[in-house]
Image: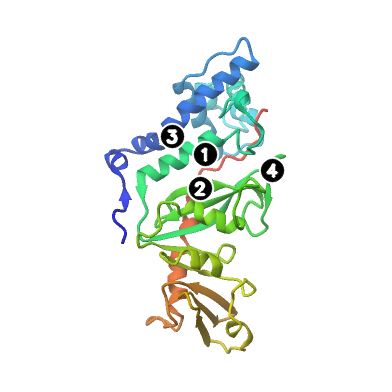
């Protein structure tokens, strides 16, 4: 049973857009200002300290650059008619100061780097952001896990190539999203981890759902995450997802029989995990720990397919909202 869901007290008290923004951003900005000034003093004896107000202006200019596309960074300060006769950026910050801050942004203290964490540079901000997301909202009955790509074409050892994503090159982020597309927890994939137990997919799922199990929720996953082994681990909670036909533990009955369109075959193993093979335009394999082989009253689709189609969209909604404020630009490092 889900005890409490929805916005927590700090979020309920926020009565304006700026108030909601501050809930998520202020703590992160304070940290970035401290580390940026630390790095500035380490690298530049004449470094001019940046304060929170100035850094917010810097962030605002970055966001505007995501909305207004120009070929080069310097074009935002150009008074030529080709780029606008009254450049807004110049009213709030000089180009030299903007580039100075951009080239000194830091999220962690380099002197503490032990070189055993590929995410050391960004680790504090990732942890702060994840903590804030979890404190301000409690997911309801349906949650979904999928991966997103943060666009990045620079040189980094754990850069990923995923051809079916809008941005094919970037950093993979595993996300747990609630209904409405709220991102409740993230995990950045940094490549091979010698301390990881189990597969990458299973490890990501167990880390993301920590604190949400055994409370009546249903987890939706796609075929990269879904496996019989994972479903058996999570029997105390509900799990629904597509599954690959060659996964370990898949029963032979669901793989060998030929099906006509609209036909299905279902098998339940000894631990209560149901596997359904259904033929529509193509064959679809589904796993569930909460459904049988019944069909929907609205259509001829199995109920498990309807449930999955409703639950799988949460991460897509999250990605769509994030796409409205893109900022893909080289830094001045």
Left or right of residue 184: residue 80: right
Task: Report if the CB atoms under discs 4 and 3 are less than 8 Å apart.
Answer: no
Q: Residue 77, relative to residue 45: is it above or below?
A: below
Mark 1 lies on residue: 126
Q: Earlier in the sequence, mark 2 or mark 1?
A: 1
Residue 101 point in image, percent of width and height: 58, 23
Q: CA distance from mark 3 to mark 2?
A: 16 Å
Task: Report if the CB atoms under discs 2 and 1 are less than 8 Å apart.
Answer: yes
Q: CA distance from mark 4 to mark 2?
A: 21 Å
Q: CA distance from mark 1 to mark 3?
A: 12 Å
What is the number of the mark on residue 186? 2
Q: Earlier in the sequence, mark 4 or mark 3?
A: 3
State which mark lies toward you, 4 or 2. 2
Residue 78 is at least partly visible in this image = no
Q: CA distance from mark 4 to mark 3?
A: 26 Å
Q: Secondary structure at mark 3?
A: helix
Q: Residue 252, relative to residue 217: is it above or below?
A: below
Mark 4 lies on residue: 153
Q: CA distance from mark 2 to mark 1?
A: 8 Å
Colour setting: rainbow
Q: Earlier in the sequence, mark 3 or mark 2?
A: 3
Q: Name the residue located 61 percent from the left edge and 21 percent from the top edge.
A: 100
What is the number of the mark on residue 305? none
Mark 3 lies on residue: 25
Residue at the farthest top position: 46
């Amino acid at each position: 049973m889900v005890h409490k869901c929805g916005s927590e007290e700090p979020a309920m008290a926020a009565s304006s857009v700026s108030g909601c923004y501050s809930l998520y951003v202020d703590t992160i900005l304070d940290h970035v200002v401290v580390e940026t000034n630390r790095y500035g003093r380490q690298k530049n004896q004449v470094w001019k300290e940046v304060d929170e107000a100035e850094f917010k202006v810097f962030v605002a200019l970055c966001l505007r650059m995501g909305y207004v596309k120009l070929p080069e960074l310097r074009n935002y300060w150009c008074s030529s008619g080709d780029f606008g006769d009254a450049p807004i950026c110049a009213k709030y910050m000089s180009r030299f100061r903007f580039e100075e801050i951009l080239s000194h942004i830091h999220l962690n203290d380099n002197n503490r780097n032990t070189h055993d964490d590929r995410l050391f540079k960004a680790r504090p901000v990732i942890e702060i952001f994840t903590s804030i997301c979890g404190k301000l909202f409690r997911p309801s009955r349906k949650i979904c896990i999928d991966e997103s790509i943060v666009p990045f074409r620079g040189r980094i050892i754990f850069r990923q190539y995923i051809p079916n994503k809008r941005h094919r090159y970037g950093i993979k982020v595993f996300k747990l999203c609630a209904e409405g597309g709220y991102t409740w927890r993230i995990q950045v994939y940094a490549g091979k981890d010698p301390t990881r137990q189990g597969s990458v997919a299973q490890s990501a799922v167990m880390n993301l759902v920590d604190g949400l199990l055994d409370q009546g929720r249903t987890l939706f996953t796609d075929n990269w995450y879904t496996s019989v082994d994972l479903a058996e681990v999570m029997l105390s909670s509900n799990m629904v997802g597509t599954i690959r036909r060659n996964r370990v533990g898949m029963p032979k009955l669901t793989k060998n029989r030929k099906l006509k369109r609209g036909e299905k075959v279902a098998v339940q193993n000894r631990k209560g995990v149901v596997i359904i093979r259904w033929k529509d335009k193509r064959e679809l394999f589904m796993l569930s720990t909460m459904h049988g082989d019944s069909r929907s009253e609205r259509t001829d689709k199995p109920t498990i397919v309807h449930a999955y189609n409703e639950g799988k969209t949460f991460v897509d909604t999250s990605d769509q909202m994030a796409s409205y404020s893109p900022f893909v630009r080289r830094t001045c490092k």
